[in-house]
Image (cartoon, helix red, strand yellow):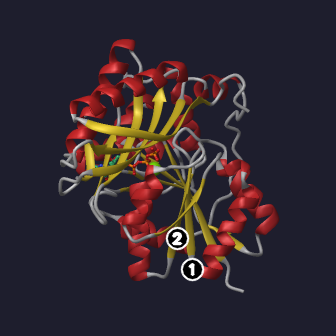
Amino acid sequence: MKKNKFMIVSGFLGAGKTTTMIALADYIDKNMGKAAIIVNDLGAKNLVDAEYTATTGCSVTEITGGCICYQIDNLIDKLRRLRDVQNADITMSDIHGFGVGALNFVYHGLHEKFNEEFELAPFLVIVDPMRLRMIMPEKADINLPEEIAYLLRSQLAEADAVALNKIDLLDEGEAGKFVKFLEETCPGVPVFAISAKQKKNIAEIAEHVMSHTAGLKTVDIGYGGSDFIVAESKLCWYNRRFFIKTWDGGKIDGNAFIDDFIEGVRSGLAPKKRNIPHLKIFAAGGEDDFGKASLLGVGCKTEYDKKIENLHDKFRVIVNGRAACESRLLSPIMDEALEKAVTKNGVECQIFFTECFGMMDEGKS
Ligand SMILES: Nc1nc2c(ncn2[C@@H]2O[C@H](COP(=O)(O)OP(=O)(O)OP(=O)(O)O)[C@@H](O)[C@H]2O)c(=O)[nH]1
Ligand SMILES: [Mg+2]
């Protein structure tokens, strides 16, 4: 039986894992075979990444409720289904943006037990140049707790291949500086410079991952140790799904609603000196009319992967926040931001689902 390929795509929050997987799947589908994507995250359900990926026409499956590191049986079930039902030649799964340890738990785990069935493609780590500056010699202050540098370093330590993403935002000299740093930090590991958003240099990575196998390195990243615990304890997750509609059948400007909501989150977090490395919003109005926005920090401008095209009388909305903030602080800030946006836009809101938790919150597990 031909072995099915599996690849993990790791990297810090907002680095571009989802955008890269979509670009790779698109390239592979057109040129090399069939690709499938697994979207993995903590939290129960309601993932912006899964909703958004599905709109691109890629084959997408979710693994929710915890990191894939702790769901190997579930992962294997999904991989078999994607192979047998959807004829996937390669399945890619991300690991959440604060995640480390998948090299050991998932790659070595699969290699030991399922080597006959699955071939492991190079463990791919996506890097956002702006966040990378935090661990470069300049040790840039990017308004995130310095303890989080542990996660960036550990993710790179696990890599078989690294992609410096968002080169569309850099000039050639700057890109060269980042690539050099990555090559020095990850000796022997190929470093690609890409723009996932503009689908630039995606062919090179696709060719590489389809024709190479994982290095299956053994690296000690101090998983579960004090640096790991301190870094993870700085972070929290927020997921909410709600529905808005007008009282009188009038129309809503969904983009304005998203902007108002994001502004509320920004102005709630900034005075408390907390940050949100990735806030994602997906809002669907008509059949195919949806918007997807990302905020990569309180000081950043909102980026739209897609704007809503028309006014609609109702929207279903999903919010995913990944914050450097205590969960008990973030929760009321999110409530207030929603309340303000609802009032300003004159809509009625029904909340269906909310969860907010820190990795290390007492009583969580
Ligand atoms: N300019 C630019 N923006 C990009 C590029 N790739 C991704 N982005 C943007 O960066 C933001 C985050 O991208 P995602 O693909 O959602 O990042 P992610 O790593 O999956 O984020 P998490 O799943 O939250 O960890 C989005 O607004 C993307 O449009 C790129 O090549 N260039
Ligand atoms: Mg993602």
Can you tell me whether the CB of the residue at mark 1 lies under 8 Å from the nearest atom of ligand 2? Answer: no
Instruction: Residue 171: give its label.
Output: none
Q: Position of residue 351 (x, y in %)?
A: 45, 39
* Discs 1, 2 touching: Cβ within 8 Å: yes
Looking at the picture, does residue 283 appear above or below residue 289?
A: above
Residue 86, label in figure: 1
- Looking at the image, is 192 positioned above or below residue 183? below
**Dot 2 amino acid type:** Ala
Query: Taking 50 as reference, is 271 above or below it?
Result: above
Classed neighbour count for the residue bearing mark 2: other residues with Cα under 10 Å, few (<14), some (14–19), many (≥20):
many
Q: Tag 1, which secondary structure?
A: helix
Please name the amino acid that badge 1 sits on.
Answer: Gln
- State which tag comes first along the sequence, 1 or 2: 2
Residue 60 makes an appearance in the image: yes
Task: Residue 353 in the image: state x and y as whole percent.
Answer: 52, 41
Depth order, front residue of 12/242: 242
Assign the C terminus to one quadrant of the image: top right
Residue lying at the far bottom of the rendered structure: 1
- Residue 114 appears in which quarter of the rendering? bottom right
Residue at image mark 2: 36
